[in-house]
């Protein structure tokens, strides 16, 4: 077991290293990429450009530049090529927004997904099951940016029921915070609700036909007890691991579109803007941050799975 | 840089007339009218380039910083031509200029204090300029004429002395020596770069903790990419610089202009710096015209045509573009906020002359696509591949799409490349990009015809950061610019500037299509008629803002 | 139900193919602007785009059937040509993903050892990138200078870039399950038998393993197309997909959301088409899975933009 964990952790580090190298390369082999010239401003003299170049180490070889940049990124002293703002500060600033969005949406999609999935399983084959299937399929087919833009305009500005975007810190006004987030939460969650309800439905149906459920029934347990004690509990395990992975992915940048459409100015939106400006330090930092989330959560999920289910080969 | 909507001018003329005519109510924004107190929340679309006077170089930052950091000289807070008048700011009086035009001297006002209560000293001025030079600011070039400035930059030591600046803290006197006479130097002393900061201000970008300044407002909060707050300064007193009316002005960064406009309509925001999006203009003009106005700017919008590579090294090919362009179509894309024109020096700048007729047809009529097609064919460039460059700010991609289709219509094989606004001008200004044509716009640093035509000076072409995007290199124009720039009194050679302008457009060195109009749009809470002064150089004057 | 939606998808493809016919009918191509033009409505001459920039709404006739966009272009024509781009990119990317994923899955699963180790690490790395961030980063970088890999040149701004980016991003989602299946198949008797008869690795993979993977691949295919179409739309929406003036549903939505007040059809119509297409593919995929492989791990929606 320990060996397995150590190995997974080592793999994790290798993957993160590869991610950083790849991101760095993507933005450093492209033409017109001389950031010194871009940073020098409107009417720079050659000496100014040179000064910036020396200051930032743009003259060094790529590997040296990579090391310098990564030292800055990991040490928290990296600053944006353009705004000169500290990248870590900006991520820390954006994180509560991204987390507010991700946590709220994740709770919503878990609850709604399980409730609807269970309902569909219990009514399997009936009209309401079919209806839920169709709804789920529609849900996973809706592009968030389109839905978000329409919701923000029609329910936000036109109807005035919700703010038309933006964010209010939880500490400032919890009610206003939630009010601003209702639409983004819903829009982001819809996709997952559709997906989770379908997965749970088939898990429940699979479990119900298992021997131990039949045994439990035969022992005379009430249908309700069977459902809660045995079926649901076992059906939920894969859902929870899925939930961990999806939550990681959403925090790691899966919410870029939602953040952008609702102008939440979280980490994802910050990264999207930096990418457009070919601003390497923020892109590197956010990608590392996102990859870290994804990799850590998949590793944790793997390890937890290995503990729960000894049948899994520890490779 | 042309993307920055910065314009600083010595003599912006005729703007007031336009502004007044444009909005219908005359003489609005008198400094005395309007209530005091209260707080306003306003919006900008992106974090200003800097909240540090040494580094700020766009109108997004100059608009707020103008009321925070007063330079030795400043401009009168008034609309139109009146607003272009230089008045003493931190200096007691306008500078005394020596007979040879090389020495400027002024005295700091007695008893003047920064917003933190510390007294203003003469030596602070040298420190202020040193920060500009040492921080590699975009404004460096303005001060390079000071004796010893180049040595100071090259030395790289912030503690070194600039030999051309002498300051005496005891008397408050400052003397500046230039290497060459420079007729515009008084204006330089009124730029935001010269906005005074204490000698204790570090040699670093202070945008997150802006230093104290001398002005009606101080920046009391600055959270990058989120918001910054200006608060009124007690006891600020410089004659002719208004003290401001509202207590605090909080600027939020709201990325979408649609949201901004919606919130101004709904009263959640009191003012937006950028124009509302075209989508909402019709509604705003129809239902909220009592708090919306448009005003012209001395700007030139054009398509650059790269003369160094095919197909636009061919004069006929360039002419075809000029013949085909329909400025009225682009005006619709601007939602009507574009005044069509066909030349380089815009209305309001000395040397502007409406060409009569325009060499390639009336700009307020449709273009002649058939004639353009014929020209392209005659030039033998039909079917040539052309890549159009455009940035992604507001309506620019849409203009790019219009232009791309136009080029296709007249016989080229054009496609479009859209580049983030933050790196657009560096990209097209880089020789290696080989940008054939694309969108460009120019707002001058000074309202001087040279500021416009220098873009077409062949001797100023650089391999990177080039602003002569069309690689125009005409010996006659080069010589003309060099000769005319020597003349200190622009008015006497305005005709000759106009002549150069005509030459440039007759040879189709560029394809100009008009000047942009900017806007003031405020919430219902604001006393719009009395409190929305538009300064010709800095845009909306925050000291005029007030609530009903 | 799956059949009906499959038919819907085929109908959409046919519509896209017929785009030039409608363009003929409407009298203008997808990129032809008409900012200052006028058309006759109820006997009056009306601006296609008003002086303050508002485009005309749906006319329900061959010309401007669904109205104009802000450049005076015919929305219906753009919608159909946009369908071509969106579907082409979606289908081509899904195809490429399938090929790459099958190849990687087969090699890694069957050859094992270092091949497996390398392949798995590569998949892990791509997997570790946030999907849309990787897509945006790759597309942005390539949009500036294009890409040259050996004999293949991806010209900056071409649809080939979108196809390649989307294909690469989704490879791990398909390659992992395929690898798993190959691992299981490898131990099966018929594979052992083939090997015992002296079949080389290549032969075994192609004639023994590949046919057995077909049901997995078939189940994945419609879902991959759906995901690819959605990712293309998302990239175009963020300005790094199909480059205007060429239309795609994503960049039409992007331009449309700027016009929700005066011309809501500009955002609603391409969005609805996108939803219809993806829904058709998802229902089809659902049906295919039930028919072929009810316990398949292929599922729509997982980790998507």
Image (cartoon, coloured by chain):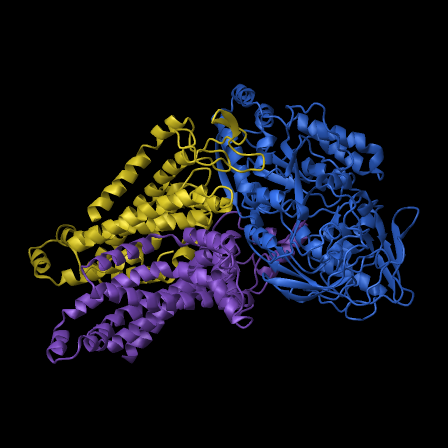
Chain colours: A purple, B blue, C yellow
Quadrant of the frame with the N terminus of chain A: bottom left
Residue A155 position (above or below residue B414): below
Residue B510 percent coordinates (x, y): 63, 32
Using the image as rendered, state which of residue B522 and residue C203 is in the foreground.
Answer: B522
Quadrant of the frame with the C terminus of chain A: bottom left
Residue A186 percent coordinates (x, y): 40, 61
Residue C156 percent coordinates (x, y): 44, 42
Using the image as rendered, state which of residue B302 and residue A146 is in the foreground.
Answer: A146
Using the image as rendered, state which of residue C53 and residue B504 is in the foreground.
Answer: C53
Query: Total number of numbered labels?
Result: 0
Q: Is residue B198 visible?
A: yes
Q: Is residue B207 visible?
A: no
Using the image as rendered, state which of residue B483 and residue C32 is in the foreground.
Answer: C32
Residue B338 position (above or below residue C94): above
Q: Residue at 17% of width from left, 56% of height from top? A: C293
Is residue C183 shown left or right of residue A181? left
Residue C140 percent coordinates (x, y): 46, 49
Is residue B539 shown left or right of residue B280? right
Q: Which image quadrant is residue A192 in?
A: bottom left
């Amino acid at each position: 077991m320990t060996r397995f964990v150590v190995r997974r952790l080592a793999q994790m580090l290798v993957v993160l290293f590869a991610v950083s190298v790849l991101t760095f390369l993507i933005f450093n082999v492209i033409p017109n990429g001389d950031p010194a010239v871009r940073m020098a401003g409107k009417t720079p003299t050659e000496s100014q450009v040179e000064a910036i170049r020396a200051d930032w180490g743009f003259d060094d070889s790529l590997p040296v530049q990579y090391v310098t940049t990564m030292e800055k990124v990991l040490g928290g002293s990296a600053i944006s090529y353009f705004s000169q703002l500290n990248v870590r500060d900006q991520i820390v600033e954006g994180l509560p927004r991204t987390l507010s969005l991700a946590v709220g949406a994740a709770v919503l999609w878990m609850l709604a997904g399980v409730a609807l999935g269970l309902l569909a399983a219990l009514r399997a084959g009936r009209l309401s099951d079919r209806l839920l299937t169709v709804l789920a399929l529609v849900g996973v087919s809706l592009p968030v940016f389109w839905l978000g833009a329409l919701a923000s305009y029609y329910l936000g500005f036109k109807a005035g029921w919700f703010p038309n975007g933006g964010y209010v810190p939880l500490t400032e006004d919890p009610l206003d915070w939630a009010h601003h987030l209702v639409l983004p939460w819903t829009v982001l969650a819809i996709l997952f609700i559709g997906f989770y309800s379908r997965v749970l439905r088939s898990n429940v149906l699979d479990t119900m036909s298992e021997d131990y459920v039949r045994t439990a029934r035969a022992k005379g347990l009430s249908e309700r007890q069977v459902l809660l004690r045995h079926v649901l509990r076992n059906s939920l395990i894969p859902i929870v691991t899925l939930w961990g992975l999806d939550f990681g992915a959403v925090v790691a940048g899966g919410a870029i579109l939602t953040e952008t459409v609702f102008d939440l100015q979280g980490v994802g939106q910050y990264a999207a803007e930096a990418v457009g400006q070919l601003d390497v330090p923020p892109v590197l930092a956010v990608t590392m941050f996102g990859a870290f989330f994804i990799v850590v959560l998949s590793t944790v999920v793997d390890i937890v799975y290995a503990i729960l289910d000894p049948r899994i080969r520890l490779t | 840089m042309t993307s920055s909507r910065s314009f600083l001018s010595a003599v912006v003329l005729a703007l007031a007339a336009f502004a007044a005519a444009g909005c219908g109510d005359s003489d609005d924004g008198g400094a005395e009218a309007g209530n005091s107190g209260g707080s306003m929340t306003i919006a900008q679309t992106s974090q200003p380039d800097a909240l540090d006077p040494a580094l700020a170089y766009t109108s997004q930052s100059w608009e707020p910083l103008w009321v925070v950091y007063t330079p030795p000289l400043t401009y009168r807070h008034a609309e139109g031509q009146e607003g272009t008048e230089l008045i003493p700011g931190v200096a007691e009086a306008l500078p005394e200029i020596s007979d040879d035009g090389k020495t400027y001297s002024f005295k700091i006002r007695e008893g003047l204090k920064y917003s933190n209560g510390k007294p203003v000293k003469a030596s602070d001025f040298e420190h202020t300029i040193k920060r500009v030079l040492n921080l590699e600011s975009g404004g460096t070039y303005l001060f390079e004429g000071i004796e010893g400035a180049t040595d100071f930059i090259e030395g790289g030591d912030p503690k070194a002395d600039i030999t051309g600046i002498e300051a005496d803290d005891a008397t408050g006197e400052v003397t500046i020596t230039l290497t060459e006479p420079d007729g515009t130097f008084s204006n330089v002393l009124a730029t935001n770069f010269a906005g005074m900061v204490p000698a204790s201000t570090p040699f670093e970008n202070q945008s997150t903790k802006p230093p104290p300044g001398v002005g009606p407002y101080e920046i009391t909060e600055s959270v990058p990419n989120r918001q910054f707050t200006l608060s009124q300064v007690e006891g600020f007193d410089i004659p002719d610089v208004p003290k401001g009316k509202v207590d605090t002005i909080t600027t939020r960064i709201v990325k979408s202009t649609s949201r901004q406009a919606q919130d101004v309509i709904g009263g959640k925001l009191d003012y937006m710096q950028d124009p509302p999006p075209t989508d909402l203009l019709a509604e705003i003009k129809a239902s909220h015209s009592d708090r919306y106005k448009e005003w012209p700017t001395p700007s030139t919008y054009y398509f650059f045509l790269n003369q160094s590579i095919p197909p636009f090294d061919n004069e006929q090919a360039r002419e075809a573009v000029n013949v085909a362009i329909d400025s009225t179509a682009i005006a619709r894309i601007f939602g009507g906020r574009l005044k069509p024109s066909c030349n380089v020096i815009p209305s309001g700048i000395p040397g502007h002359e409406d060409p009569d007729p325009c060499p390639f047809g009336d700009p307020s009529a449709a273009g002649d696509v058939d004639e353009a097609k014929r020209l392209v064919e005659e030039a033998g460039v039909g079917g040539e591949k052309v890549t159009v460059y455009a940035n992604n700010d507001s309506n620019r991609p849409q203009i790019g799409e219009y232009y791309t289709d136009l080029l296709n219509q007249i016989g080229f094989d054009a496609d479009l490349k859209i580049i983030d606004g933050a790196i657009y001008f560096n990209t097209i200004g880089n020789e290696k990009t080989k940008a054939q044509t694309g969108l460009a716009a120019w707002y001058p640093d000074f309202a001087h015809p040279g500021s416009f035509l220098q873009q077409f000076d062949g001797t100023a072409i650089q391999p990177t950061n080039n602003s002569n995007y069309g690689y125009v290199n005409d010996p006659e124009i080069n010589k003309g610019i060099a000769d005319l720039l020597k003349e200190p009194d622009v008015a006497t050679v305005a005709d000759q500037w106009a002549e150069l302008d005509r030459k440039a457009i007759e040879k189709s060195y560029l394809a100009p299509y008009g000047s942009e109009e900017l806007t003031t749009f405020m919430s219902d809470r604001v006393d719009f008629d009395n409190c929305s002064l538009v300064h010709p150089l800095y845009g909306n004057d925050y000291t005029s803002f007030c609530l009903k | 139900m799956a059949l009906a939606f499959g038919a819907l998808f085929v109908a959409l493809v046919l519509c896209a193919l017929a785009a030039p016919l409608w363009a003929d009918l409407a009298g203008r191509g997808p990129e032809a602007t008409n900012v200052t033009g006028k058309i006759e409505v109820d006997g009056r001459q009306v601006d296609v785009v008003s002086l303050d920039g508002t485009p005309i709404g749906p006319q329900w006739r061959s010309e401007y059937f669904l109205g104009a966009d802000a450049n005076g272009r015919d929305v219906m024509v753009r919608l159909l040509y946009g369908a071509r781009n969106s579907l082409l990119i979606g289908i081509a990317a899904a195809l490429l993903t399938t090929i790459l994923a099958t190849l990687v899955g087969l090699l890694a699963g069957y050859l094992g050892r270092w091949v497996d180790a390398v392949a798995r690490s590569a998949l892990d790395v791509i997997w570790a990138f946030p999907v849309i961030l990787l897509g945006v980063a790759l597309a942005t970088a390539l949009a500036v200078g294009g890409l040259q890999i050996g004999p293949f040149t991806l010209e900056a701004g071409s649809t080939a870039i979108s196809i390649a980016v989307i294909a690469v991003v989704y490879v791990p989602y398909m390659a992992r399950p395929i690898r798993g299946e190959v691992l299981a198949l490898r131990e099966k008797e018929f594979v052992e038998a083939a090997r015992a008869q002296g079949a080389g690795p290549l032969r075994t993979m192609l004639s023994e393993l590949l046919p057995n993977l077909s049901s997995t691949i078939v189940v994945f295919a419609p879902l991959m197309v759906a995901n690819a179409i959605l990712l293309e739309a998302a990239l175009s929406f963020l300005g790094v997909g199909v480059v205007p003036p060429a239309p795609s549903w994503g960049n039409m939505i992007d331009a449309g959301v700027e016009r929700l007040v005066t011309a809501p059809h500009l955002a609603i119509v391409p969005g609805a088409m996108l939803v219809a297409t993806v829904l058709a593919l998802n229902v089809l995929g659902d049906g295919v899975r039930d028919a072929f492989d009810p316990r398949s791990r292929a599922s729509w929606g997982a980790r998507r933009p």
